[in-house]
Amino acid sequence: MAKANKTNETTVNVTDFINSYVEKDDKKSDSFQLIKLMSSWSGSEPKMWGPTIIGFGSYHYKYASGHEGDAPIIGFSPRKAEFSLYVYSPTEESKPLLDNLGKFKMGKACIYIKRLSDIHIDILEKLCKMTIAYINEHHECACREK
C-alpha cells in the first residue's frame, strides 16, 4: 500500500499561521512580502500545505515508482533559522540565475535565505516564473493554459 503524503493542502488560515508561528517582526514582514509577491507572480491565493508551508497553486505529480500526489507550484516556509523557498526547477535557463540571486544556500529541492534583503527580488521573480512554466509544461496542474 502506498504511503500517504505528509504535505497536503490544509484549511489553516495563512495570516493566522504567520502571526502565531513566526516570532520575529522582520521575518513576519518578509513573510507577508513573499505572500504578496508570490500571489502576484503565480496568480494564486496562498494556502497552507502541511503545518508550515505556504503554497501558491497546485499540481499533480506521479513518479515512475507509482508514488503520486499534489504539491504547491511555488511556495515558502518561514522556518526558525531561515526561509525555505520552493521556487526552483533545474532547467538550463534557470541555473545561471542563481549566480545573480544574492546570498543563499541551495538544498536538494529548495533555496534557503535568511531574509529577503539578502537576495535580488527580480531574480527571484524570474525563478518563480520559470518554475511555474516548467510545471505547467511537465505536470498536470491548474496553471495549464487551455
Image (spheres, rainbow, N blue to C red):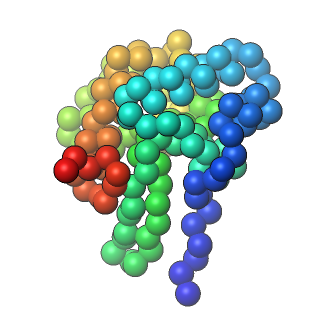
Q: Quadrant of the N terminus?
A: bottom right
Q: Position of residue 53 (x, y in %)?
A: 60, 44
Q: Residue at x 43, y 45 (%)?
A: 57
State left or right for residue 64 relative to residue 68. left
58 vs 79: above or below: below
Q: Quadrant of residue 28?
A: top right
Q: State how many labels appear.
A: 0
Closer-to-camera residue (142/119): 142
Q: Residue at x 46, y 60 (%)?
A: 70
State left or right for residue 6 relative to residue 130. right
State left or right for residue 76 relative to residue 25. left
Q: Is residue 40 visible?
A: yes
- Furthest residue toward bottom: 1
Q: Is residue 98 visible?
A: no
Q: Quadrant of residue 48?
A: top right
Closer-to-camera residue (85/42): 42
Q: Position of residue 26 (x, y in %)?
A: 69, 15
10 vs 92: above or below: below
Q: Residue at x 35, y 17 (%)?
A: 122
- Furthest residue toward front: 146
Closer-to-camera residue (57/106): 57
Q: Position of residue 11 (x, y in %)?
A: 66, 50
